[in-house]
Image: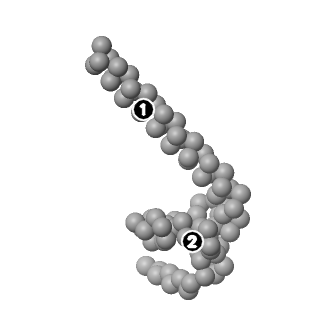
Amino acid sequence: KIRYFLFGAVVMFLFVSIKTQAQNLENGKKIYQTRCLVCHQADGGGVPNMNAPLDGSTNVVGNDIARLVKIIKNGFNELIFLSIL
């Protein structure tokens, strides 16, 4: 019986985790659409010489989550150098 209980608990945990992840993704999509889309575009490419691209940016795909949250909350007012390859 304990085995069945543990199995059920693991299944329930996975279900809640997947549901929470899907909800977080949906919430993030809504936030992007209302706050970010106009400047950074649907594909994250930004507007040349106006708004920085997000796709592939180290500020977005880097490992410093705290920095990313700070940029989202406070904006970003630093010079960005883009390399064209």
Camera-nearest residue between 62 and 6: 6
Secondary structure beneath dot 1 equals helix
The image quarter containing residue 47 is bottom right
Q: Residue at x 52, y 36 (%)?
A: 19
Q: Which residue is mark 2?
A: 71
Quick one: which residue is furthest to the front in this view? Answer: 2
The image quarter containing residue 78 is bottom right
Amino acid found under the numbered disc labelled 2: Ile
* Mark 1, other Cα within 10 Å: few <14 / some 14–19 / many ≥20: few
Q: Is residue 79 above or below residue 46?
A: below
The answer to whether 31 appears left or right of 62 in the picture is right
Q: Is residue 9 above or below residue 58?
A: above
Quick one: which residue is furthest to the left in this view? Answer: 3
Q: Position of residue 34 (x, y in %)?
A: 71, 57
Q: Is residue 26 above or below residue 1?
A: below
Q: Is residue 7 above or below residue 66?
A: above
Observer able to see residue 55: yes
Q: Residue at x 69, y 62 (%)?
A: 35
- On residue 72, which mark appears? none
Q: Earlier in the sequence, mark 1 or mark 2?
A: 1
Q: Residue at x 32, y 24 (%)?
A: 6
* Front position among marks 1 and 2: 1
Observer able to see residue 45: no
Secondary structure beneath dot 2 equals helix
- On residue 13, which mark appears? 1
Amino acid found under the numbered disc labelled 1: Phe
Q: Position of residue 61 (x, y in %)?
A: 45, 65
Q: Residue at x 36, y 29 (%)?
A: 10
